[in-house]
């Protein structure tokens, strides 16, 4: 068994104790989980965790749902990489270090316990020099088209509310970064939205703004409020259409 297979097996044991019985959006009150970035080491004088948490909190306060939760490892003890790490790197996600799972693994473990149906990860980009917003979905699973539709609606809403350029929706393997791969496809992937790790059928990762050129917008409470409200309204619209 190679390193990737071992990591995947351990991930399944730790994160997916019950992947069965997850219902689609045919229920009245779907379970929605937000995962703001816990990274504090991205960008000079820029706290991505703080910014993304502000956006997630703003979204959750906009027309709150009955079953809406946040998973966040920042400040948690007993895990590794709880305030840093890449969503596309084995070391920071699926690897077990000194008997500890990662912050990302903890967040997915908590989310799966809730039997979430919709999962939204919130991040900021860096080094692009584009005042823009991107949506990412996982490649190759059965809900790919639904996730693309949801991501497109969210990216469009964020762009309209904030002035960020709409850069569309991309597959997670297209970033070409680091070494975390989907076991099913063998392609590079985002850990948080991999269907082998995350039991939610609907999963989107948002890269909102650039930590350089978009800094003023992202760090402002008004900007976070506008973006969070826009994401939530797009989600509610999509949910209504799905029903």
Image (cartoon, rainbow, N blue to C red):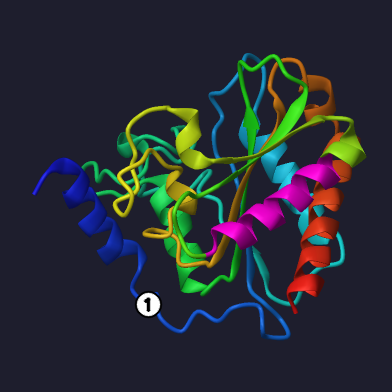
Residue position for label 1: 18
Viewport quadrant of the C terminus? bottom right
As drawn, is 138 to the left or to the right of 220?
left
The residue positioned 61% from the left and 15% from the top of the image is 127
Instruction: Classify residue 145 as left or right of residue 230.
Output: left
For the view shown, which residue lies furthest in the left direction?
1
- Rendered location of residue 151, percent (x, y): 69, 50
Q: Is residue 34 visible?
A: no
- How many numbered circles are shown? 1
In the picture provided, is 161 more to the left or to the right than 235? right
Closer to the camera, 120 or 157? 157
Kindly indicate the quadrant of the structure image that contains residue 24. bottom right
**What residue is drawn where x is 51% and y is 75%?**
115
**Percent from the top left, x then y, of residue 6?**
17, 50
Towards the viewer: 142 or 233: 142
Magenta residues, start to end: 143-158
Magenta region includes residue 153: yes
Question: Regarding mark 1 in the picture, which secondary structure is present there?
Answer: loop
Q: Residue at x 67, y 85 (%)?
A: 27
- Residue 165, image x, y percentages: 81, 28
Residue at 53% across, 24% down: 41
Q: Please, what is the dominant secondary structure of the magenta stretch?
A: helix
Q: Nearer the viewer, residue 56 or 159?
A: 159
> Is residue 166 magenta-colored?
no
193 sits to left or right of 127: left
Q: Whole-percent x and y of residue 213?
A: 76, 16
């Amino acid at each position: 068994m190679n390193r990737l297979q071992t990591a995947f097996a351990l991930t399944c044991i730790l994160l997916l104790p019950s992947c069965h019985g997850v219902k689609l959006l045919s229920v009245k009150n779907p379970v929605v989980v937000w995962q703001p970035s816990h990274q504090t080491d991205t960008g000079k004088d820029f706290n991505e965790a703080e910014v993304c948490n502000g956006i997630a909190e703003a979204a959750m306060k906009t027309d709150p749902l009955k079953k809406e939760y946040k998973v966040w490892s920042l400040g948690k003890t007993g895990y590794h990489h709880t305030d840093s790490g890449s969503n596309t790197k084995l070391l920071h996600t699926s690897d077990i270090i000194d008997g500890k799972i990662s912050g990302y693994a903890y967040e997915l473990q908590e989310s799966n316990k809730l039997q979430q149906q919709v999962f939204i990860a919130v991040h900021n980009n860096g080094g692009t020099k584009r005042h823009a917003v991107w949506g990412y979905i996982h490649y190759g699973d059965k809900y790919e088209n639904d996730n693309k539709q949801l991501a497109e609606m969210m990216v469009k809403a964020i762009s309209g509310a904030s002035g960020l350029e709409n850069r569309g929706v991309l597959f997670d393997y297209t970033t070409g970064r680091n070494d975390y791969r989907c076991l099913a496809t063998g392609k590079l992937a985002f850990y948080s939205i991999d269907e082998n790790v995350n039991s939610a059928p609907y999963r989107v990762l948002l890269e909102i703004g650039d930590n350089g050129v978009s800094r003023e917008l992202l760090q402002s409470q008004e900007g976070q409020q506008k973006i969070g409200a826009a994401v939530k309204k797009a989600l509610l619209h999509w949910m209504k259409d799905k029903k």
